[in-house]
């Protein structure tokens, strides 16, 4: 990451789209190389978590409309959607419950 005196013009930023990432952090203009996906090569610990996320994503459409409405109501005061809230609660419960 490089700290800049000021962000360059939008034309310059557009020229580097997908290569460099320009943004402000804590009011300081910075530039970094564009984040890259590590591809399919993931750590074993990361791969072990995939089934929980898959299950959480597949369960949302199976919930009744009343339950979905309840999650939407819980999430209304946050930046999460009802689906995000349900997934988060499912994933957190899977960490502490022995099933």
Image (cartoon, helix red, strand yellow):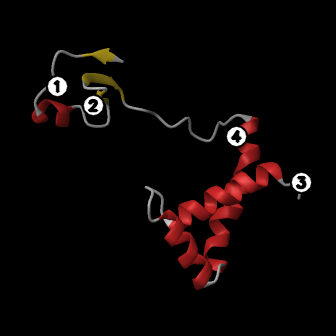
Label pair 3/1, CB-CB below 8 angstroms: no
The residue identified by callout 2 is 23
Location of residue 4 in the rendering, given as x and y in whole percent from the top left corner: 22, 16
Q: CA distance from mark 3 to mark 2?
A: 43 Å
26 or 61: which is nearer to us? Answer: 26
Residue at (28, 15) in percent of width and height:
3
Looking at the rendered image, the quarter that the N terminus falls into is: top left
The residue identified by callout 3 is 98
Residue at (37, 31) in percent of width and height:
34
Q: Residues within 10 Å of mark 4 (few under 14, many from 20)?
A: few
Point out the tag, 1 or 4, that comes first from the N-terminus: 1
Looking at the rendered image, the quarter that the C terminus falls into is: bottom right
Label pair 2/4, CB-CB below 8 angstroms: no
Label 1 SS:
loop
Q: Which mark's residue is nearer the viewer, 4 or 3? A: 3
Label 4 SS:
helix
Vertical placement of 40 versus 82: above or below?
Answer: above
Indicate left or right for 16 with 96 as reference.
left
Location of residue 59 in the rendering, given as x and y in whole percent from the top left corner: 67, 71
The residue identified by callout 4 is 46
Residue at (17, 25) in percent of width and height:
7
Q: CA distance from mark 2 to mark 4?
A: 29 Å
Residue at (56, 35) in percent of width and height:
38
Label 3 SS:
loop
The residue identified by callout 1 is 7
Q: Which mark's residue is nearer the viewer, 3 or 1? A: 3
Q: CA distance from mark 3 to mark 1?
A: 51 Å
Point out the tag, 2 or 1, that comes first from the N-terminus: 1
Label pair 1/4, CB-CB below 8 angstroms: no
Q: Residue 58 lies in what quarter of the image? A: bottom right
């Amino acid at each position: 990451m490089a700290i800049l005196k000021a962000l360059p013009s939008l034309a310059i930023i557009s020229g580097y789209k997908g290569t460099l990432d320009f943004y402000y952090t804590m009011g300081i203009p910075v530039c970094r190389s564009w984040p890259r996906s590590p591809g399919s090569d993931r750590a074993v610990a990361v791969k072990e978590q995939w089934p929980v996320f898959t299950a959480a994503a597949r369960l949302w459409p199976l919930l009744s409309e009343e339950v979905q409405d309840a999650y939407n109501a819980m999430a209304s005061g946050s930046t999460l959607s009802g689906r995000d809230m349900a997934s988060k609660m499912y994933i957190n419960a899977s960490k502490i419950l022995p099933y």
